[in-house]
Image (cartoon, rainbow, N blue to C red):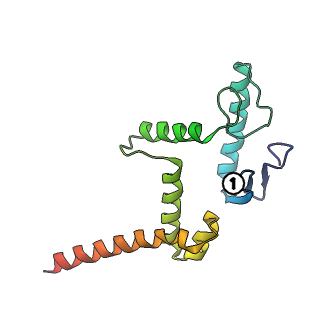
Amino acid sequence: MNFIKKPVWIVALSTLLWKKVLVCKDRILWVQEETLEELMQWKQRQVDELVKRVAVNEDNLVFTTLTGNKLNSNNFYKVVSNYSQKAGIAKDVSPHTLRHTFATDLYREIKNIRLVQKALGHEDLSTTMIYIHIVDDELEEAMKVSRRSSN
């Protein structure tokens, strides 16, 4: 099932393939079947809302502005920031925060920095190594707490 005719969003076997034109890197996003269903429902609500606003999503993008235009980085930052505030999160949350959290959680779960590197699309492993340091800092702090409590 394709969301659009152009090769930007392709849905097949519970996978979304996003071609990021500016960087010329493909990204594969593995999602559960339920998430795909939610995305398809979102897409229909988007079409309905744009019709009400007499706006057109000419490129048939999955996420657009309320006028049907492509989201830019500022639009996306505002969306993430607004939803984090609505969720009661006090700190500033950005799209990069979400990416960083995903990578850190993935590393904690699988303990394989090469797979995290691949998931993030980093060419250089040193770019991905920051996530190991975060987890190591947490281990160091836990060890300090453990030593204090044993004394």
Q: Is residue 19 above or below residue 109?
A: above
Instruction: Classify residue 86 by image quadrant.
Output: top left
Judged left or right of residue 144, residue 122 is: right
Instruction: Classify residue 68 by image quadrant.
Output: top right
Q: Position of residue 78 (x, y in %)?
A: 52, 37
Q: Which residue is drawn at 35% across and 43% down?
A: 90
Q: Position of residue 91 (x, y in %)?
A: 37, 46
Q: How many marks?
A: 1
Q: Where is residue 123 in the image (x, y as percent from the top left)?
A: 64, 69
Looking at numbered disc 1 in the image, what kind of residue is underneath it? Glu
Judged left or right of residue 20, residue 77 is: left
Q: Which residue is drawn at 70% across and 59% down?
A: 27
Judged left or right of residue 66, residue 60 is: right
Q: In this view, does 140 lie above or below 43?
A: below
Nearer to the camera, 29 or 7: 7
Q: Position of residue 150 (x, y in %)?
A: 17, 80
Q: Residue most toward the left?
A: 151
Point out the image quarter for the C terminus: bottom left
Give SS at disc 1.
Answer: helix
Q: Is disc 1 surrounded by few (<14), some (14 to 19) or many (20+) residues within 10 Å?
A: few
Q: Mark 1 points at which residue?
A: 33
